[in-house]
Amino acid sequence: MVLVTGGTGLVGAHLLYRLISNGEKVRAIYRREKTLKRVAHVFSYFSNDAETLFNTIDWVEADLNDIPKLQSAFRDITHVYHCAAFVSFEPDKYHQLRRINIGGTANIVNLCISNSVKKLCYVSSIATIGHHENPEKLINEETAWNPEDDNNVYAITKYGAELEVWRGSQEGLDVVMVNPGIVLGAGYWDGGSSGHLFKKIKDGMSYYVNGITGYVDVFDVVNIMIKLMNSVIKDEKYILVSENLSFKDFQYKVAYELNVKPPQKEAKPWLLNLAWRLDWLKHKLFKSRRSLSKQTSKSAVNISKYDNSKLKNELDFEFKPIDHSIKEICQLYLRDLKN
């Protein structure tokens, strides 16, 4: 039996759909019952028999730091996809991020070892991959992450989680790791996933930024994860990026598909520096949640170009063009708006 953590997240929901469609016997972990509706909704995009597929999943309510419940979830499990994570770039969430991303991953690794799990697939992020001084030089899996850089709190804790996974591999657990770029998928229009970007662009954005990063379709991510788990490959990590795009290009492509006006004004570095300081002040004065940090404002203008050749060569895999992903996701978003 296969276990999926983070089954109600963007990657987790699409992974569950693909596994169930492939006839796998699956157990999935969730934390809040209300989030199960989002998974069922994602299934409805791709199947006329979504409810039947959804009901074949063995759902277990558990927290990544609740060892007794996790032990129960690991009963009869042979393979684990660890997708669960807390995503936040708010500096004051650092300790919560550590507890879930690092501590929770350590628990999953330990349970994999104690239950003789055959293989673990961990979903990390390109946030844990290093950068070059020359922005035009492609970043690959060997580009070292510098812990002395001014890294955001999410990247720090995801890097710490990776160390727990590699520790598991040293203790005899077969592991594979994927480091996706910005994962594009439908059904999660609120919160920290990429779907919120589609919603914001639809509602109207005044500013664009010229930073460059990597993007990937959610089904490319889950298909690659399954291929890696079914292969003899172990103790390897892979960058999952279909294309490197500027944020401006992404915003314009989405705006075109949604038939809305794209942003017309550039948010220059000085404006972003002012914005994050005002956001910090608002947080201190009114206890509001941070929407922009020093690190995220810097990343908005950074140029980071990723090399996907390792994955393409070793799995003979071709990524879906990002234009196709954007078009499909926009169509689903507009359908949801009508309903």
Image (cartoon, grey):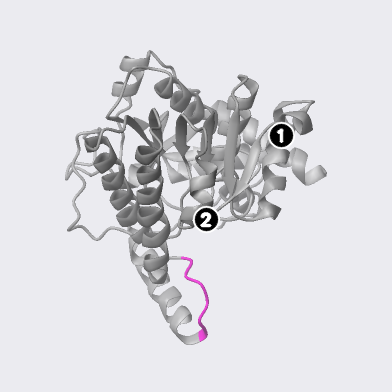
| Residue that carries the numbered disc 1 in the rendered image | 54
Q: Amino acid at mark 1?
A: Phe
In this picture, is 101 found above or below 311?
below
| Residue that carries the numbered disc 2 in the rendered image | 63
Q: Nearer the viewer, residue 226 or 262?
A: 226
Instruction: Measure the alpha-carbon separation of dots 2 and 1.
Output: 21 Å
Query: Which structural element holds mark 2?
Result: loop
In the rendered structure, the answer to whether residue 207 lies left or right of residue 104 reads right
Marks 2 and 1, the one that precedes in the sequence: 1
Q: Nearer the viewer, residue 132 or 7?
A: 7
Query: Magenta residues?
Result: 286-291
Q: Residue 80 in the image: x percent, y percent?
A: 46, 34
Q: Locate residue 132: give its quadrant.
A: top left
Q: Residue 7 in the image: x percent, y percent?
A: 57, 42
Q: Nearer the viewer, residue 297 or 141?
A: 141
Query: Which structural element holds mark 1?
Result: helix
Residue 264 seen in the current view = no
Which of the labelled discs sits on residue 111, or is there none?
none
In the rendered structure, the answer to whether residue 186 lies left or right of residue 101 reads right
